[in-house]
Image (cartoon, rainbow, N blue to C red):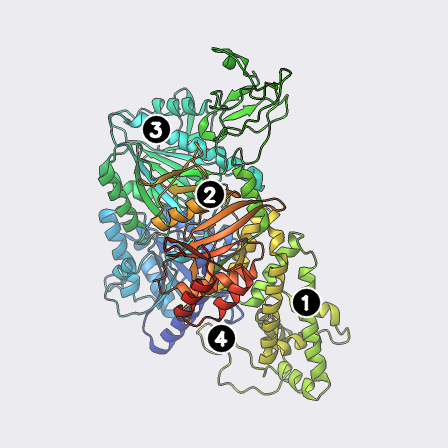
Amino acid sequence: MKVELFPFQKKAVTDLRMKAAEALGSYRRTQTPQVVSLQAPTGAGKTLIMAALVEDIYFGTDQYAEQPEAIFVWLSDSPALNEQSKQKFDLKADRIRFGQCVTIDDASFDMEMLEDGHVYFLNTQKLGKAGNLCRRSDTRQHTIWETLENTAREKADHLYFIIDEAHRGMQGKEAGKATSIMQRFLKGSTEYHLSPMPVVIGISATAARFNKLVGDTNSTLQKCIVTANDVRASGLLKDRIVITYPDDPEKNNEMAVLQAATDEWKLKCDHWYQYSYEQHYKQVNPVFVIQVLAGSGKNVSDTNLDDVIAKIEERIGTQFKENEVVHTFGSTSTLLINGLQVHHVEPPEITDDKRIRVVLFKENLSTGWDCPRAETMMSFRHAVDATYIAQLLGRMVRTPLQCHILVDDSLNDVRLFLPYFNMNTVKNVIDELQNTEGGEIPTVIDGESMDQPVYVPWTVHPPRHRNNQPIEGQMNLFPQSGNAAAEAQPSNFRESNATNGYAITESTDIPQQQIYPQSTPTPMFPIKTDNGKPDEFVSNTGVQMKLPNCYLNREEITKFINDQGLLTYLVRSVKINSYLKSLLNLASLLTQTNIYRDAAVEVKDDVTSMIRSYIESLQSTVKYDELASCVLSFKLSVRIFDVFGEPLDSGIVHDLFTTSESDLDRQLRVADAKIGGYGFPNVYGNRYCNNDDPSVFKVDCILFAADDDCITKLNRYAKKKFHALNDQYRKYVVNKSEKCKKQYSDIIADSDVVSKHNFTLPETINVRVEKVGKEYDNHLFADEKGIAVIKLNGWEEGVLEEEAKRPDFVCWLRNPPREKWSLCIPYEINGEIKATYPDFLIVRSDPILTYVIDILEPHNPDFKDNLGKAKGFAKYAEAEPKIGRIQLIRTGKDPAGKIRFKRLDLSQGAVRDKVLKAQNTDELDHIFETDGIF
């Protein structure tokens, strides 16, 4: 494949390959039709998974022999979907040659049987009674039904029939007809003289939908399931779909909603430009998708398209150029809208044409179209059209860069604006979207009114506004009267749109400076004047005394935290990759990013040395010649299966013969895959090649891979080396690009159930609005006014109040559970590893380090997880010395009998040792009594 599959996709391909081989073998033995079902939610990359499977069947894997004669028939319910799938095969599957994928054309197709080694694309619309493929003629000797029946009868041992039920392009009666046609291949049809296909691989979004398709067939069914959690964790989809509607349609008419949608799109453009520029990605160029009404009479659309374009141009402050606005209105070609030439494009062309910024459409984008660049959508349709809107929205949830954005959380959502919907009808859209896309969508879906948003952005870059109002008790450095202050403001300052995140900018002819809001008066000091009166103040024009804690420098604090590379963990339910695979990926990344340039070479040296040591130990005995003869006589045990899932050559006794070079190469490929697929045999051959017998190095590598003790030793080495490299070089990743950080994090996460990562804060997050909460101006993330509204319980508020009274307190951060950026600590309870997210991170000032970060967890002692979390925190404190305090907090009576917060500080070695030795909660309670502090 030209693209690297995500771990869950690789797992699905491996599972499908096994089940497809078993299905083919079962049919050969029992003649019972077999069905393999791939069930995966929206965004899982079902077509990509199937393309990888087709490649594995054609070219073989380390476990299954190649089957170059295999025939695949891909059936969907629309030509557009067929073309989309075929394009993905052509673009992503690099081992499938040009021309190997064939679209069955109803005008010219005529074959007695399908040819070996091809992938045929067919759609149900060509299989109706009126279709040309179903009738003989002077130019067609065989109907498509005869072709498929002949192929199934004569080539059942290498025919795979794929039914793409997940991507449905039809609705209503037409959808029912398509389902009926698809069922013919599962159940057979006496009317069309068609037998059930021997092996059917079905692609579906949910079990319910595929079960409806399969019906009461007698076929044996095997399932390969990709969960929503797998897709959600991959970053392939947006985190949120936010649907905005007006509370008052009269107050917020369609043009007002369009204005809001345009502002949101412009904001997305600004954020994507900044992110792409800073992270050195190619520009995303977000697309604004606008669904307009169908036309009546001579009108192309009953929506006033001139007003739409005029309003958008008004909000963005510039006029569109030709090709920046396009439409997909059926047979209509170029339109003149508000004086702009608006050309027609086909939906599949939108993604790759980076000139396109705005797309006008009616209904035809919901089929055969994926556009990850589509960030904002506006629909002029009314509430009765929920189905059409839901279909489109399901195509817009893919992420442009195929990853979660760490720095700017606002780029992890897609927004839809509906002027003719309300709270109830928006719920219909959400329900319909879930029905259309298959139940559990791996994306959060929320509706919000324009007056009461559900999500608001918080950032560490709150706009900084110049404040000309004097603060009571503060020395006025620029005493002026009336409007003089405004007039005296330097002309090189200009106020920009507040929505872009930058409130004040400067001209380029003077150095740029930062202006910070002052929330408390600067302390004033009496200065003696010539008359000796100490209480009078002298205005020292142009100079302001700098004192600590005059403002909260959120950017500096965030950078400090991110530069620390504090330890955080990811806890998964299963391990994705072996340590060997993870080590090889990590070594490659460390080398490519110059973090440790010799990492890959070092691993190659270590592994080839292991192979050499093993061979030398064999050569010192008589075992080498004996084992080598087994390799050359093809008697060495290798785990490889034929296309039917049976052990290759099972039950066949071979006479001794010298294996051919191709047989030896096959064994070498299996051996290479077993030791990581990293090309170690080639490295070994370059170093230890015997010019008199060039095949000796191949035999050496095959022998090493066939020895279970050698593989066990290799895996032990890989585990130890992987953790050593991660522990030593993790801290150097913090200063690399986000792309590098993401690659590093993925490699580490796939290696272990519990994996170590760098704690990295984003610069912008989207948070749910707290309707009942307290305003905090000392929270690290804040809105544009520098305020964060957060609802805390009584214990949390009390702890925070105590912290704020400390002289070294700077700010705090609420550590939300299960966010991708949250600080996570693993702990064990009842033999199971779980994740916990401490409530607070406290930032304190430090005269040497600048800042110190503390972890605080107010926790009810009645909870059963107290001991487990205490031990988890203690282990974390041992592993992360850069943390200041790490405290478990509960209430208790002080010596005066007053109820106060009692803290157990696990950063203290003596306390930590006691907690790690505790056997039950009673012992933990005793430690709180003896070592807890108020």
Q: Residue flagged by tag 2: what amino acid is it?
A: Lys
Earlier along the polypeptide chain: callout 3 or callout 2? 3
Whether tag 1 and tag 3 are in contact, CB under 8 A, the answer is no
Q: Nearer the viewer, residue 389 or 723?
A: 723
Residue at which label 3 appears: 258
Label 4 SS: loop
Q: Nearer the viewer, residue 666 or 801?
A: 801
Q: Residue at x 59, y 82 (%)?
A: 636
Whether tag 4 and tag 1 are in contact, CB under 8 A, the answer is no
Numbered badge on residue 682 = 1
Disc 2/disc 1 C-alpha distance (Å): 65 Å
Q: Residue flagged by tag 3: what amino acid is it?
A: Leu
- Tell which tag, 2 or 4, sits nearer the viewer: 2
Label 2 SS: loop
Q: Residue at x 49, y 11 (%)?
A: 481
Residue at which label 4 appears: 641
Q: Position of residue 329 (x, y in %)?
A: 35, 33
Disc 3/disc 2 C-alpha distance (Å): 47 Å
Which class describes the residues within 10 Å of circle 2: few (<14), some (14-19), or many (20+)?
Answer: few
Disc 4/disc 1 C-alpha distance (Å): 25 Å
Numbered badge on residue 805 = 2
- Tell which tag, 2 or 1, sits nearer the viewer: 2
